[in-house]
């Protein structure tokens, strides 16, 4: 399980985004609402996928994307999975509007259903990735058993990857002063929040192929780091979404 299959038009990568839109996403970060920071970071990651899918003047759909926003219910913002070429043609993502509570188990259940339907047709593709962004404890049932099932699903390239971006100022011993020099969250990194520990249990190890792509973008995540980021500033949120799109692509 090397996670080395390259995303191409014939073997596109599938990324499922789960975006927490609970009411606390209206709180401020770096002078902006958290939801606006997330929207900008996700939009930037999509633009990077468009760039990495473009050769000359031709955009080849190397990525397929689903975006599920969740509060008490789950909202499919793209009405199914869309190719990166279809998203680029629209020009912008649908708005993210904070609602009330946060039931991440429902969102992961929806992601599981998508994967069950898609995996039989993805045996030659890169392993899919589920990127989950949240800023608080889920108010529904425990999502971990569902995530464990998702992480046990696989294609020849490797098991399905699960990444967590946790918007919190309190999970690490001290703030991350230089995000580009940060080594990442390791399995033994002390975490000061119970929910952060739970999310770490639900985060995949960062594949070396993904880490190499991030190093090329001047991020110094260490070997053995997990696919988990504390979104304590806009740059870290952005790194999280860039990580989700760091699938190897055909040159």
Image: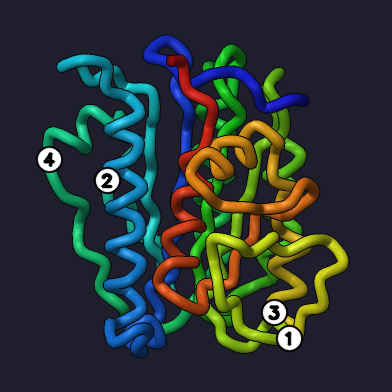
Q: Residue 151 appears at what percent x and percent y?
A: 72, 44
Residue 65, placed above or below residue 174 = above
Q: Residue 124 appears at what percent x and percent y?
A: 58, 12
**Lower position in the chain sequence, tag 2 or tag 1:** 2
Pointer 2 residue: 78
Pointer 4 residue: 90
How packed is label 1: few (under 14 Cα within 10 Å), some, or many (20 or more)?
A: few
Foreground disc of the pair 2, 1: 1
**Lower position in the chain sequence, tag 2 or tag 4:** 2
In percent of the image, x 52 and y 52: which residue is there? 131
Q: How far is disc 2 from disc 4 in space, using C-alphas?
A: 11 Å
Nearest the camera: 115 or 251?
251
Q: How far is disc 4 from disc 1 in space, using C-alphas?
A: 42 Å
Quadrant in which the N terminus appears? top right
Q: Horizontally, is 125 left or right of 15 in the view?
A: right
Q: How far is disc 3 from disc 2 in space, using C-alphas?
A: 29 Å
Pointer 1 residue: 173
Nearest the camera: 60 or 17?
60
| Mark 2–mark 1 CB contact (< 8 Å) | no
Pointer 3 residue: 195
Foreground disc of the pair 4, 1: 1
């Amino acid at each position: 399980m090397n996670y080395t299959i390259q995303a191409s038009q014939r073997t596109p990568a599938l990324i499922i985004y789960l975006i927490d839109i609970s009411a606390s996403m209206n709180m401020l970060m770096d002078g902006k609402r958290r939801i606006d920071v997330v929207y900008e970071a996700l939009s930037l990651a999509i633009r990077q996928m468009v760039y990495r899918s473009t050769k000359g003047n031709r955009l080849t759909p190397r990525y397929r994307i689903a975006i599920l926003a969740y509060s008490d219910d789950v909202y499919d913002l793209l009405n199914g999975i869309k190719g990166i070429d279809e998203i680029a043609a629209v020009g912008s993502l649908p708005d993210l509007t904070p609602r009330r509570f946060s039931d991440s188990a429902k969102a992961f259940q929806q992601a599981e259903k998508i994967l069950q339907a898609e995996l039989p047709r993805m045996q030659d593709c890169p392993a899919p990735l589920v990127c989950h962004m949240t800023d608080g404890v889920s108010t529904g049932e425990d999502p971990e058993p569902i995530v464990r099932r998702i992480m046990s699903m696989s294609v020849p390239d490797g098991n399905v990857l699960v990444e967590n971006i946790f918007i919190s100022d309190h999970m690490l011993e001290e703030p991350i002063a230089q995000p580009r020099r940060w080594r990442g969250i390791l399995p033994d990194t002390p975490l000061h929040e119970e929910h952060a520990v739970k999310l770490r249990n639900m985060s995949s190890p960062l594949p070396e192929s993904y880490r190499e792509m991030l190093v090329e973008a001047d991020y110094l995540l260490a070997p053995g780091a997990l696919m988990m980021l504390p979104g304590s500033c806009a740059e870290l949120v952005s790194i999280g979404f860039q990580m989700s799109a760091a699938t190897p692509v055909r040159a």
